[in-house]
Image: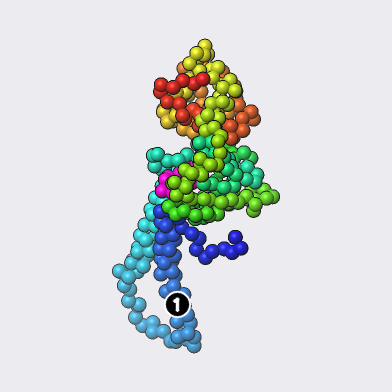
Amino acid sequence: MSFIPLWPASISGYSHQVDLLVVCFTVLIVALSAPVFILIVVFAARYRRGRAANRKHPVNRNVVAEVSWSAIPFLALIGFYVWSTELFAGLHRPPTGELEIDVVAKQWMWKFQHPEGQAEIDELHVPTGQPVKLTMASQDVIHSLFIPALRIKQDVVPGRYTGLWFTADKPGTYRLACSQYCGTNHSEMIGSFVAMKPADYAKWLSQSSNDPSLAAEGAALFRGRGCSGCHGPASTVHAPSLVGLYGKPVPLQSGEVVVADDEYLRDSILLPQSQIVAGYPSIMPTFQNVLSEEDTLKIVAYIKSLRPGEATQ
């Protein structure tokens, strides 16, 4: 873009709420600060030559006015704090039935992987009107995915997953970028965010690639790396079952109980000794520095796809 717009496009319900918050907070700040600066100018002009003050009687005090100009701004700011906190917390409460897209950040590019298998570099296609959840990982340093039209930004940190969700309402092509300095070519780590009508998105999916789904690629890696030798139904090794594991509580040898979310599955693959399941021996080898973040995301997608009645192969 050859210019910076005064007010970027707003294409989601969340972005409209953020805009409203910014406008209302700006109005509050102006309302609180403008009288001070106006009175400074008025008093400076009116009393520029000085005036004798009558000090015979104490100044009358209006307690109600003095309390009001402290209490009202305080309560207003508390209201803005609650409002902004609720908006922030909403970013981490995705609705059910969302479209899950995996993101890998690396110097200096964004790679997006759709569950159907389509992969994109520096371009993200999504359907309008449907919640989209991004599960993000970094291959090297800290990055930060920023989509101005959605008013959202999330750091992508090496060594763990971070997440973000949104619902785009207006079709079009918008800008995305890395907002965290990540090295020499940081300014070139930009791309396009393409919101499409559901029918157009389905057509794009059917035409963009014939690659296997993310879960299917993960299944191939699962077998190729020997994971099925321990976690398969015919295995003689005493290893936890992965069928229906995702989202369920997992008791650990330490006495803790954790939820088998994306982060837990990733750590179990790359750092298997960090959280050992109760009742199982600590024999799983680490795949850290063996699997890339992309391959790990594929295996996680495969494990998430396993449902009761299905068996690991």
Point out residue 93 in the picture as x, y percentages from the top left corner. 41, 43
Q: Note whether 279 is above or below 28 in the view shown.
A: above
Point out residue 113 in the picture as x, y percentages from the top left corner. 54, 39
Q: Quadrant of residue 308?
A: top left
Please state the total of marks drawn on the protein image: 1
Q: Which residues are magenta?
A: 126-134
**Disc 1 residue type?**
Ile
Queried whether the magenta region covers residue 165, the answer comes back as no
Point out residue 168 in the picture as x, y percentages from the top left corner. 45, 50
Q: Note whether 10 is above or below 250 in the view shown.
A: below
Q: Note whether 97 is above or below 189 in the view shown.
A: above
Residue drawn at 57 percent across, 47 percent down: 123
| Residue 86 falls left or right of residue 207 | left
Residue drawn at 51 percent across, 40 percent down: 206
Q: Quadrant of residue 17?
A: bottom left
Residue drawn at 46 percent across, 29 percent down: 305
Residue that numbered label 1 is attached to:
38
Queried whether the magenta region covers residue 130, the answer comes back as yes
Residue drawn at 45 percent across, 77 percent down: 38
